[in-house]
């Protein structure tokens, strides 16, 4: 499939310009949240995830399913902390270590905005009917049209990035077929995941074990001080320091403002 044509069409419809607007809005939003109510976001999300988890647990009697539900809850809490620490919404920025996960969030976010666009279209005849009976509809119409534009452009930038990822996957698939013979996308994903796992284990294996055991000892998300208290060797300390330093450097790099000329910076985010 020719994804390049679809990418070009998305660009013509304003994907890059609106994407830049989304990034600037996101930066302002996180800056305000961290200054005005730094603990509210995480606490609010934790309560929401716990509430949803309890509802799901009550509907199942399988211990295996319950364990998966608890793991999903824990993962969601980790992700919201990742968003907060990096000031990046997970729906708008690709995780280079797991690009397929980004595709899932793109598809989910697209469905939300498609639903919103349909609601906008349904509102138009309702507003028209209201205007015939003398209701002040100018403001409502303006708000609805603005919402329609935002939903359309959000769908457009999601299509832009979905097609970019699919184009990359298609190129990768062709390359692997030429070099390795017949290999499926699932196999390629497993190979890449295993390579990342091996690289991480080699560089941060002791730090990973330290964090894992800290999680086991605590019912919830351990703090950095609690993780440090569990350090048992110099190697764990050294690897933890490298992991924290690398994360901070990556966050600092990703926080640089996006300029119109440096199009290449967009490749790591929506």
Image (spheres, rainbow, N blue to C red):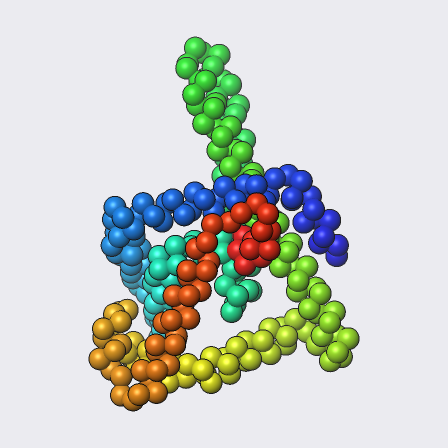
Residue 61 x, y percent position in the rendering: 34, 70
- Identify the residue at image location x=43%, y=10%: 134
Residue at image coords 48%, 44%: 22
Residue 190 in sight in this render: no
Name the image quarter holding residue 99.
bottom right
Residue at 47% x, 24% y: name it: 142
Dividing the picture into quadrants, the one containing residue 191 is bottom right
Residue 171 vs residue 124, the one in the foreground: 171
Left or right: where does residue 254 sit relative to residue 209? right
Task: Name the spot of residue 173 as percent of width and height, x first.
Answer: 70, 69
Question: How many numbered badges does the structure rendering display?
Answer: 0
Q: Is residue 118 above or below residue 197?
A: above
Q: Is residue 93 left or right of residue 210?
A: right
In the depicted view, which residue is nearer to us: 4 or 65? 4
> Does residue 233 sit above or below 129 in this rendering?
below
Residue 126 is left or right of residue 58, and the answer is: right
Residue 81 visible from this viewpoint: yes
| Relative depth, front residue between 134 and 259 | 259
The quarter of the picture where the N terminus appears is bottom right
Query: Which residue is drawn at the image coordinates 45% and 44% (left, top)?
Result: 24
Depth check: 100 or 35 in front? 35
- x, y (%) of residue 165? 62, 59
Q: Where is residue 107 drawn, in percent x and y?
A: 55, 53
């Amino acid at each position: 499939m020719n994804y390049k044509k679809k990418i070009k069409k998305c660009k013509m419809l304003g994907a890059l310009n609106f994407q830049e607007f989304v990034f600037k809005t996101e930066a302002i939003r996180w800056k305000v949240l961290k200054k005005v109510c730094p603990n509210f976001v995480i606490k609010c999300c934790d309560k929401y995830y716990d509430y949803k988890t309890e509802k799901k647990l009550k509907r199942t009697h399988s211990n295996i399913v319950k364990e998966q539900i608890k793991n999903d809850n824990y993962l969601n809490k980790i992700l919201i902390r990742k968003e907060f620490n990096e000031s990046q919404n997970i729906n708008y920025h690709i995780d280079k270590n797991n690009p397929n996960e980004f595709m899932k969030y793109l598809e989910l976010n697209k469905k939300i905005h498609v639903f919103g666009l349909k609601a906008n279209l349904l509102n138009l005849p309702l507003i028209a009917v209201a205007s015939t009976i003398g209701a002040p509809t100018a403001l409502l119409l303006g708000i609805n049209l603005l919402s329609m534009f935002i939903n359309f452009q959000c769908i457009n930038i999601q299509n832009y990035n979905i097609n970019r990822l699919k184009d990359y996957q298609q190129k990768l698939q062709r390359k692997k077929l030429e070099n390795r013979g017949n290999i499926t996308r699932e196999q390629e994903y497993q190979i890449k995941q295993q390579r990342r796992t091996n690289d991480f284990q080699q560089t941060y294996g002791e730090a990973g074990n330290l964090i894992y055991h800290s999680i086991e000892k605590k019912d919830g998300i351990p703090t950095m001080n609690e993780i440090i208290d569990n350090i048992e060797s110099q190697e764990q300390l050294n690897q933890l320091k490298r992991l924290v330093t690398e994360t901070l450097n990556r966050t600092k790099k990703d926080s640089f403002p996006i300029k119109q000329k440096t199009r290449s910076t967009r490749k790591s985010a929506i």
